[in-house]
Image (tube, rainbow, N blue to C red):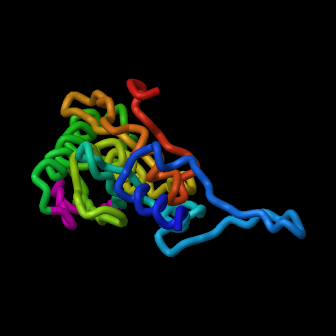
Amino acid sequence: MRRRVKEQLKRIGGMEFWDTNFSYIDKETQEETFVPVPEERGTNLIEDTPLPPGTCYTATSDGDKVSLIKIEVITRAGNGKLNISGTSSAGMKEDIRNTYNCIHANEKTILSQKHSLARMDVTVQVTALLGSTQQTGVGSAVFCGIVSAVFGRNLKPALGVIGNISIGGAVERAVNFSDRVSLLSENGAKTILVPMDNL
C-alpha cells in the first residue's frame, strides 16, 4: 500500500516522492524483495536504442504538472514550408516556429552548404506520452530533431533534451527543472541535455 501511494504521489509531481524505495526482507532467507505496482512508471518509453533521425524526447511543465513529450521531425524536398501537427497549444507552436526561424537564419553555421531549409519542407509532430498538458519549452528538442533529420543522423540512445530556444538563439533557463529531469530519467533517459543556466 505504501508503494502504491508513493507511485501515485510521484505522478502528481515532486522530487520529494521520487527517491524512496519500499521493499521487504524475508526473515528466513534475508532476501530483499522490491514490490512492483501497476502505477510504477515503466522505463521503456524512451528506448535504449539509437533514436531514428529527427526523433527527440523532452519534458514540459506548467509549474504543477509535468508531461513527457516526443518530438518527431521529417524533412523532404520542397520550398521551405514548416508544418506542425499533434498540438493545439499556441505557445508550443510559437516555440517550434522560433526554433525553425533561428536555424533558418543561421543555417550557414548550423547546417552544411549542401543543406538548406529553403529547399526542404519540414514537418514537426508533437506526441504527449505522459501527462495531459502540452506546455511551452520544447525549442531545444525541436532544434536537435530538425538538425538530426536534415543530416539523417541518429541521436544518442536514451537521450532527453530540456530547454527552449529564443528567436535570437539563446537557450533559456528551464523552469521546474528537477521534476522534468526526474520524469525523463524514470522513463528511460540515460543522458539529458540541459541549459547552462540550470547546470
* Apparent side of residue 102 relative to residue 42 in the rendered image (left or right): left
Tell whether 196 sits left or right of 191: left
Q: Where 75 sits versus 176, above or below?
A: below
What residue is at 17 percent from the left and 61 percent from the top?
83
Outermost residue to the bottom: 38
Residue at left offset 81%, top offset 68%: 26
Find the residue positioned furthest to the front: 27
Q: Which residues are magenta?
A: 72-87
The part of the image, by quadrant, that contains residue 127 is: bottom left
Q: Nearest the camera: 104 or 95?
A: 95
Compared to residue 114, the image places residue 10 above or below, namely below
Q: What is the x, y in percent for residue 180?
A: 40, 46
Q: Is residue 76 magenta?
A: yes
Above-or-below relation of 181 to 80: above
Q: Main secondary structure of the magenta part?
A: strand
Q: Tell me, yes or no, if residue 74 can be seen here.
A: no
Residue 163 drawn in magenta: no
Given residues 100 and 195, the one toward you in this image is 195
Task: Write the residue at 68% across / 61% down.
Answer: 23
Q: Nearer the viewer, residue 75 or 51?
A: 51
Would you identify the image quadrant in which residue 77 lies? bottom left
Picture mark count: 0
Q: x and y percent of residue 100 in the render?
A: 23, 45
Q: Is residue 104 visible?
A: yes
Return the residue nearer the eye: 78 or 26: 26
Query: How far across and how far down the image is residue 136, in percent?
Result: 22, 46
Residue at the farthest right position: 29
Instruction: Please name the residue shown 73% across and 67% down the image.
Output: 33
